[in-house]
Image (cartoon, helix red, strand yellow):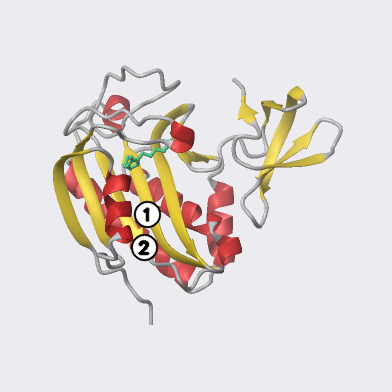
């Protein structure tokens, strides 16, 4: 029988970062799987690689979920990114088309970013002890001031105002679904769904790596979550995060 995450939601008015708050709970040992920290505002919202995450107060979905994926071999930790991305895509697809996942875990609509994911694992020995999965989904904000290259929101795309609480509940249901699939070790189902949604998959485009700019085609991700690009000369290159840049 499938096990489900028993969510308990803590809704904060303002916090530095929901990921910081959740990580603090983990450090204090004061947490259970399914604790969700949600905030109307973050004063120091964090993105990947020390970037900041912009969000106007009360306009977007900002949350962190604590998970305890003790069942997951450490080499499979990228699966957590995959299931969170799939849940966000599924939630968005109830409202909008043309959704993709820009490797490793940005959610795109067309060529614009609508959501970002910040997964922080704490490892104990050879096991993932806990995971804080932070999600920022741009919902009702229509003007972005930071220098993020290409932000967009659901409202800007649809000219509709969204109910943030309702989106949260759909998202949590979808996370439950994909996390149960992960718990059942159905890696093929997850890999196929992620692969099908990959931004620029099987399309020739331009990239840059340590050797310079080149044209290539994304063909997928490998078992440890590295991006695989086929270059013009048919060689395959595998990249860790930040080893390759997507060019326009
Ligand atoms: C990225 O695309 O760079 C990842 C962005 C992740 C932002 C979310 S908002 C909720 C949670 N708390 C944070 O400080 N960051 C994540």
Quadrant of res 78: bottom right
Q: Nearer the viewer, residue 85 or 67?
A: 67
**Residue at the (64%, 42%) spot, across then down:** 240
Q: Quadrant of the C terminus?
A: top right
**Residue at the (54%, 63%) spot, across then down:** 189
Residues under numbered marks 2 and 1 in contact, where contact means CB atoms less than 8 Å apart: yes
Mark 1 highlights which residue? 132
Name the spot of residue 245 as percent of width and height, x first. 62, 28
- Up the image or down, 241 lies above or below 23; here it is above
Q: Is 163 on the left-hand or right-hand side of 194?
A: left
Q: Residue furthest front?
A: 28
Name the spot of residue 121 as percent of width and height, x first. 45, 56
Q: Nearer the viewer, residue 13 or 193?
A: 13
Q: Nearer the viewer, residue 194 or 21?
A: 21
- Up the image or down, 72 lies above or below 142; here it is below
Name the spot of residue 212 as percent of width and height, x first. 75, 22
Q: CA distance from mark 2 to mark 1?
A: 6 Å
- Element type at marker 1? strand
Crowd rating for badge 1 (residues with CA inside 10 Å; few <14, some 14–19, many 20+): many
Q: Is 79 on the left-hand or right-hand side of 52?
A: right
Q: Residue furthest bottom?
A: 1
Q: Quadrant of the N terminus?
A: bottom left
- Up the image or down, 221 lies above or below 142; here it is below
Mark 2 highlights which residue? 67
Q: Earlier in the sequence, mark 2 or mark 1?
A: 2
**Residue at the (25%, 69%) spot, across then down:** 6
Quarter of image, ligand 1: top left
**Residue at the (84%, 39%) spot, across then down:** 235
């Amino acid at each position: 029988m499938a096990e489900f995450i028993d969510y308990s939601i803590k809704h904060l008015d303002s916090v530095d970062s929901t990921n910081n708050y959740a990580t603090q709970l983990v450090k204090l040992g004061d947490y259970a799987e399914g604790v969700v920290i949600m905030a109307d505002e973050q004063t120091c919202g964090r993105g990947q690689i020390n970037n900041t995450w912009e969000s106007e107060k009360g306009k977007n979905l900002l949350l962190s979920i604590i998970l305890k994926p003790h069942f997951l071999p450490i080499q499979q930790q990228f699966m957590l990114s995959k299931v969170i991305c799939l849940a966000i895509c599924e939630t968005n697809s109830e409202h909008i088309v043309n959704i993709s996942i820009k490797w490793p875990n940005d959610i795109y609509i067309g060529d614009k970013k609508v959501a970002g994911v910040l997964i922080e694992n704490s490892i104990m020995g050879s096991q993932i002890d806990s995971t804080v999965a932070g999600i920022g989904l741009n919902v009702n904000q229509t003007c972005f001031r930071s220098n993020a290259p290409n932000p967009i929101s659901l409202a800007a795309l649809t000219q509709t105002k969204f109910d943030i609480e309702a989106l949260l509940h759909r998202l949590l249901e979808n996370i439950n679904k994909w996390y149960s699939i992960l718990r059942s070790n159905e890696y093929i189902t997850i890999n196929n769904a992620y692969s099908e949604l990959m931004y620029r998959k099987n399309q020739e485009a331009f990239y840059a790596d340590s050797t310079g700019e080149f044209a290539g085609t994304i063909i997928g991700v490998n078992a440890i979550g590295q991006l695989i690009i086929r270059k013009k000369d048919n060689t395959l290159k595998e990249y860790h995060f930040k080893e390759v840049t997507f060019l326009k």
